């Protein structure tokens, strides 16, 4: 029996674990992917207040060690279901079942795919969703990045250090990414911007050899001979297992306000999986802390 169970060891879940464990509560965190979550695939984090520059991996390591140092447990188990048994919640993983007085769901988001015909088959064989993890495989080779947000722009800048050429393919003529990242990318001579365009086909026998890019304005198609395509077109929620408890909105996010409270007492949500408009590292941390303090019922006491 735990005071609270946290589902997801990303920034929100680990921040909740730090606050819970530091307050002397018994806290267990379940993670089915990599501890640290989304931020582990960020080359550098430069906008977390108080930390001018840190790699995503180091940030995640520091945060998980901080949670562990206060006594939180982190287990690599996949949560399959949660059951609301009134004042007690039961969480079922692929290895067992666990009980707690409260559950904080901090499952984050998963990357969006382009939905191309051979995308799944070629993932790991030229198609990647993580430039920091896979970029080094393409040293001195040309690669492409799809997307126009902060991830795509920072991936392009990161890859331009290793790769002979980086094609940045974006479906519109304006970037969603912040100006500083766009300016950094523009300053790199080996980044070529391909605007108003989309990747429409992936070619290659066993691995990616070539992509077809279509201009959305004039419908012109061209081939780019790249062995690496980094897809950075945003994220989507993965909350299907929580549908049964009736806490999802129409878009699959968890309906919870800033306190993290859902419509089910004792079930909280924090971070990117929650229905909200700003999804940043610092707001994930803040969500985790809000949820942990609300679980402990001490939110208004300025602890
Ligand atoms: P994002 O901001 O949602 O951007 C996704 C990009 O992919 C957009 O440019 C979008 O185009 C494009 N896109 C979406 N679906 C597409 C499709 N089917 N085909 C082609 N293009 C498609 O995602 P993100 O860049 O991963 O960022 C996610 C969050 O993390 C954001 O809040 C971001 O600020 C944050 N982040 C911050 C940093 C940082 O260093 N500060 C780094 C990484 C991420 P449109 O623009 O046309 O919609």
Image (cartoon, helix red, strand yellow):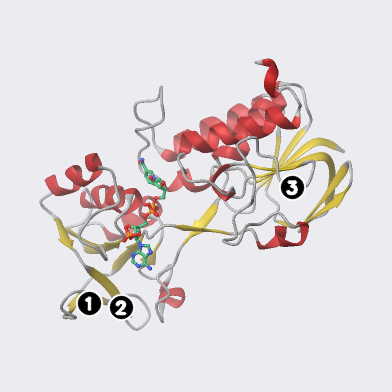
Figure quarter occupied by ligand 1: bottom left
> From the viewer's perspective, is the residue at label 3 or at label 2 nearer?
3
Badge 3: how crowded within 10 Å, few (<14), some, or many (20+)? some
Local secondary structure at mark 2: strand
Q: Residue at x 52, y 57 (%)?
A: 110
Residue at horizontal 31 percent and vertical 66 percent from the top: 229
Left or right: 167, with 145 as reference point: left
State how far apart marks 3 and 1 are (Cα): 45 Å
Chain-order first, disc 3 or disc 2: 2
List x then y, in percent, for residue 2. 83, 36
**Within-10-Å neighbours for mark 1: few <14, some 14–19, many 20+:** many
Q: Position of residue 67 (x, y in %)?
A: 63, 30
Q: In this figure, what is the number of numbered marks?
A: 3
- Residue 177 visible in the snapshot: yes
Residue 11: give x, y in percent of width and height.
Answer: 55, 38
Query: Do the CB atoms of the residues marked 1 and 2 lie less than 8 Å apart?
Result: yes
Residue occupied by mark 1: 214
- How far apart marks 1 and 2 lie (CA) works out to 7 Å
| Real-space CA distance between mark 3 and mark 2, rounded to the nearest whole angstrom | 42 Å
**Residue for badge 3:** 263
Kindly check if marks 3 and 1 are in contact, taking CB atoms under 8 A apart as contact: no
First reached walking from the N terminus: tag 3 or tag 1: 1
Q: Report the residue at 27% width, 76% height from top.
A: 209
Q: Which residue is mark 2?
A: 200
User: As rendered, which of 177 and 93 lies closer to the eye?
Assistant: 177
Q: Secondary structure at mark 1?
A: strand
Label 3 beta carbon less than 8 Å to ligand 1: no
């Amino acid at each position: 029996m735990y005071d609270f169970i946290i589902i997801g060891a990303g920034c929100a879940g680990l921040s909740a674990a730090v606050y819970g464990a530091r307050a002397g509560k018994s806290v267990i965190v379940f993670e089915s992917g990599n501890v640290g979550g989304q931020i582990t695939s960020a080359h550098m984090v430069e906008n977390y207040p108080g930390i001018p520059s840190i790699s995503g991996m180091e940030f995640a390591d520091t945060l998980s060690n901080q949670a562990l140092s206060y006594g939180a447990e982190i287990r690599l188990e996949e949560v399959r279901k949660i059951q609301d048994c009134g004042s007690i919640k039961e969480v079922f993983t692929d290895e067992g079942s666990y009980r707690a007085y409260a559950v904080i769901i901090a499952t984050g988001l998963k990357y969006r795919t382009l939905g191309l015909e051979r995308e799944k088959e070629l993932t790991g064989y030229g198609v990647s969703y993580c430039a920091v993890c896979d970029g080094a495989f393409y040293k001195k080779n040309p690669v492409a990045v799809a997307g126009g947000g902060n991830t795509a722009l920072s991936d392009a800048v990161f890859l331009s250090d290793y790769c002979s050429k980086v094609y940045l393919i974006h479906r519109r003529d304006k970037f969603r990414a912040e100006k500083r990242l766009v300016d950094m990318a523009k300053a790199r001579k080996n980044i070529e911007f391909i605007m108003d365009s989309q990747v429409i086909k992936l070619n290659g026998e066993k691995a990616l050899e070539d992509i077809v890019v279509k201009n959305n304005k004039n419908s012109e198609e061209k081939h780019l001979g790249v062995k690496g395509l980094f897809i950075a077109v945003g994220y989507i929620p993965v909350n299907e297992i929580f549908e049964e408890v009736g806490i999802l909105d129409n878009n699959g996010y968890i309906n919870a306000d800033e306190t993290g409270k859902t419509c089910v007492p004792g079930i909280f949500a924090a971070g990117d999986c929650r229905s909200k408009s700003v999804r940043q590292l610092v707001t994930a941390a803040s969500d985790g802390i809000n949820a942990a303090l609300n679980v402990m019922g001490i939110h208004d006491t300025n602890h």
